[in-house]
Structure formats: structure tokens, C-alpha cells
């Protein structure tokens, strides 16, 4: 029979180990959540929707507005680690080869590698993103933000070339950020 103190210490160690394990799992979920949530359904669909002030904007399965960064034309990724928490890329598994297009979507779909298992959807050669500052469907809070070397703009669903893909600067005010990744209103 073990001493009472020994059982308590062993139990305490297990509790600490369990807490540590739970903390690691929780941190993993938080860090990977943007990748999992933006990947959408197993068969992603891009749609055209009327976002306030931007008729025919490109949205994902969940009607979340999609943005591009103007300096990423040609699938040249500039939005990396410091950027992706604010601008989650629209990701799919490497095995996905087709994206369904809803009515009014005319562009060319492509992909750019993001990791060994995930790739990002491109539209007319621009990688597309959602914006953390959009708290729901059909919002445009990221429109006109300047960060990461370019300007973030909504995507025109009916655009059939890279040159016509970004919305032109809107008449409404734009937001400029300084530094790496924050956004202001």
C-alpha cells in the first residue's frame, strides 16, 4: 500500500499534466481555427451578392465578403503570418480541384499553395481573403484598408480579368493603417 502523500502527489501531477494537455489542445484550436473555418464546405462555392454599396461582390459559402490585396496580382502572396489573423485566406485542402461558381460569377479560379495540406483560392490571379473585422454576412468593413504593401478591396464577382477584379476606390471614406496588421475604423 502506498503512502497517502504519494497518491496525492501522483494525482496532483496528473492534474497538472491534464491541465497542460488541455491548454495545448485549446491553443492549437485557436491557432488553427482560421484555417478550418475559412476553408468552407468540402465543395466550396463562390457566389455573387449585393454587399452594401458594392453590388455583385464575391462572397464565400457563408456569404462572407471576399477581399483581395492589390499587390498580390499573379498569386504573389504578401499576406503571411502577421497578416492572416486579420485577413484569413480562403483555404481548401490540397485535394480540392474544383470550386463551384454561383450565378453572376465570371472569373477564373485558381489556387496557390499555403502549406503541405492547404491551398488558397485565387480569383483572376488574386488570392482571396475574408476580413476579421466583418462580424457577419455581406459586410464591407475591410474595403479600402491600406496595409501589407497594398490596398484591400472587395472582389467583383462578374470580373473576367485581373484588371477589372478589384472594385475601384469607393466614394466613401477609406481607412489607412500603419504598421503590420492592425485595422482601424
Image (cartoon, grey):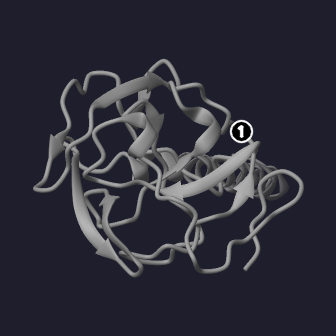
Residue 108 to residue 55: above or below: above
The part of the image, by quadrant, that contains residue 62 is: bottom left
Figure disc tally: 1
Along the line of sight, the residue nearer the viewer: 93 or 18: 93
Along the line of sight, the residue nearer the viewer: 14 or 78: 78
Q: Residue furthest right?
A: 179
As drawn, is 162 to the left or to the right of 31? left
Image quarter in which the C terminus is found: bottom right
As drawn, is 16 to the left or to the right of 53? right
Residue occupying the point 38% across, 26% down: 111
Residue occupying the point 23% across, 61% down: 48
Crowd class of label 1 (few under 14; some 14 to 19; many from 20; radius 10 Å): few
Residue occupying the point 47% across, 51% down: 166
Residue 137 to residue 92: above or below: below
As drawn, is 23 to the left or to the right of 182? left
Residue 1 to residue 119: above or below: below
Along the line of sight, the residue nearer the viewer: 61 or 49: 49
Residue 103 to residue 49: above or below: above
Residue 110 lies, in percent from the top left, at: 33, 27
Residue 124 lies, in percent from the top left, at: 37, 34
Residue occupied by mark 1: 81
Residue 58 lies, in percent from the top left, at: 32, 57
Secondary structure of the residue carrying tag 1 is loop
Q: Residue furthest top?
A: 116
Residue occupying the point 30% across, 56% down: 60
Amino acid at each position: 500500500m502506498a503512502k497517502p502523500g504519494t497518491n496525492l502527489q501522483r494525482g496532483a501531477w496528473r492534474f497538472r499534466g491534464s491541465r497542460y494537455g488541455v491548454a495545448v489542445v485549446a491553443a492549437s484550436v485557436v491557432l488553427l481555427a482560421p484555417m478550418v473555418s475559412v476553408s468552407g464546405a468540402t465543395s466550396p462555392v463562390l457566389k455573387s451578392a449585393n454587399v452594401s454599396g458594392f453590388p455583385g461582390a464575391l462572397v464565400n459559402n457563408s456569404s462572407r465578403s471576399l477581399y483581395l490585396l492589390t499587390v498580390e496580382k499573379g498569386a504573389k502572396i504578401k499576406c503571411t503570418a502577421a497578416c492572416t489573423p486579420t485577413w484569413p485566406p480562403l483555404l481548401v485542402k490540397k485535394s480540392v480541384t474544383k470550386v463551384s461558381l454561383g450565378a453572376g460569377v465570371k472569373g477564373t479560379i485558381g489556387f496557390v499553395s499555403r502549406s503541405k495540406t492547404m491551398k488558397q483560392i485565387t480569383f483572376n490571379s488574386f488570392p482571396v481573403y475574408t476580413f476579421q473585422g466583418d462580424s457577419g454576412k455581406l459586410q464591407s468593413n475591410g474595403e479600402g484598408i491600406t496595409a501589407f504593401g497594398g490596398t484591400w478591396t472587395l472582389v467583383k464577382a462578374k470580373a473576367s480579368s485581373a484588371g477589372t477584379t478589384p472594385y475601384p476606390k469607393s466614394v466613401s471614406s477609406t481607412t489607412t493603417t500603419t504598421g503590420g496588421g492592425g485595422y482601424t475604423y
